[in-house]
Amino acid sequence: MCLFSSCCATEDDIDETDCGECSQQCEFIEEIAHFCSSSVSSSSSSLRETSYVFFSLNCQLLRGVCRGQGGRPSYLLLRAACLANRLASIEEFVDAIALQECFDEESTSLLIRKLSAYFPHVIRGKAKSGLVILSKLPVRHSVFHEFKTSSGGERLFFNKGVLGVALSDPDEDTTVCMFNAHLQSDFWRESRETREEQAKEMKTFVQKSIHSRVFVGSASSDVIDAAVVCGDLNCIAGSAEYEKIMEVLGGEKQTFRDTLPIGDDDDESLQTFPECMYSLKKGRYVVVDETTKKKRLDYIFEISEEGEVKMSRRRKTKARVVRALRDDNNVPLSDHRGIIAAIERVYN
C-alpha cells in the first residue's frame, strides 16, 4: 500500500514502509521498460554499442504552503518516501538520476537514504542549490558552479547553479559526464535576462569541465562516451526565450542538442509543468484544472563537443516526457513531470 493512504504515519513509519506494487507504480515501470526496450537505432554487426539512460525530475521538496512551495514537512516526507520507491523501481533500466528542488534537508535525506541501495553513488550540490545526482556508475570526479548572476528572493535564499559528475564505466573503461542545472524562476519577477546570463555561465562551466583531464580522468584510454545536461531551465520550450538560450548554448553548431522535439503548444506528451499545486485546505497536492496552460520547462541536452577531448561518434538519442509520478490514490508526487533520455554510442 502506498504511504499516502496512511496520512497519520510517523517519521519512522515513513522510513520503513514500502510504497508497494500499486497500479501507478506498475504503470510507471511498464512505461520506462517500454521506452528502454525500443531500440534507439539498428546498427551493423561490425559495430559495438553502448547505451546510457538518464532520468531528470524536479521534486519540489521545498517546505511551505504558499504558491510555488511543496507543502508541510510531514507531507514532504511522505512524498519523498514514495518518490524514492517509484525511482528505485526503475533501477534496472536507468543509469543515473538528476533531481532538482531538493531544498528541504529532512525529506531530501530520506529520499537519498531510500534510493542509495539502488543508486549507491550520490553527489549533492552546494547547500541550498537543491541539486542531487544519483548513479549506479562510480563517480570519478564532481564539480559545482554557483551562478554569479541571480535576482530576487532566489539570490537571498538559494544557491542555484550547475552540478557536474564524471562517471566511470568500468566495463567500457570510459567516462560519462552528467550535469544537473536549475535556472532562475519567474516566481519573484520576470527573469529572462537573468536566465540568459546563467545559460552563458552554464555553457562555460560545462565546456571547461569536459575539457579538464582532472574531471574526466587522465588515462590515455579515457574518452567521453556520453555527456548530458539535465534540469529545469524555467524557460518555455519553443518560446522566443528558448530560441535565444539555444543560440547562447551553441546555435547552429548544436553544442547543446535538445533531446526532445518542440511540438505543438497543446501536445501534452511534451509538457512537464504544472501538474498540480499544493492545497492548504486539503493538505496535499491537487491536480490543476484543464484550463491551466502547461508547458515544458525541463530538459535533457546531449553535449556534442569537438576538440581537445575525444568523444565517441553519436549514433542516436531518444527521449520522452514520462507520466506524472503518482501515489496509489492517483495524486501527483511532484508538480513537474520527469524526462528520460537514452544515448547510444557506437565504436568501430
Image (cartoon, rainbow, N blue to C red):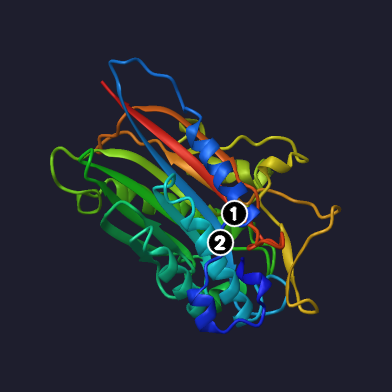
Amino acid at circle 2 = Gly
Is residue 185 placed above or below 153 in the rendered structure? above
Is residue 238 placed above or below 347 in the rendered structure? below
Where does label 1 land, which residue? 25
**Could you tell me if residue 104 is visible in this image?**
no
Amino acid at circle 1 = Gln
Quick one: SS at disc 1? helix
Viewer-side label of 1, 2: 2
Residue 30's image quarter?
A: top right
**Could you tell me if residue 157 is visible in this image?**
yes
Name the spot of residue 44 as percent of width and height, x first: 35, 15
Where does label 2 land, which residue? 20
Q: Residue at x 54, y 69 (%)?
A: 80
Name the spot of residue 327 as percent of width and height, x first: 65, 62
Q: Residue at x 49, y 76 (%)?
A: 15
Q: Earlier in the sequence, mark 1 or mark 2?
A: 2
Residue extending farthest to the right is 291
Is residue 22 placed above or below 271 in the rendered structure? below
Residue 168 falls left or right of residue 29? left
Q: Quadrant of the N terminus?
A: bottom right
The label shown at residue 293 is none
Name the spot of residue 107 as percent of width and height, x first: 52, 75
Residue 156 falls left or right of residue 148? right
Q: Nearer the viewer, residue 331 or 175?
A: 331
- Contact (Cβ within 8 Å) of mark 1 with mark 2: yes
Q: Nearer the viewer, residue 168 or 178?
A: 168
Q: Nearer the viewer, residue 179 or 270?
A: 270
Name the spot of residue 309 as percent of width and height, x first: 25, 38
Distance, label 1 to label 2, CA atoms, is: 8 Å
Quick one: SS at disc 2? loop
Q: Residues within 10 Å of mark 2 (few under 14, many from 20)?
A: some
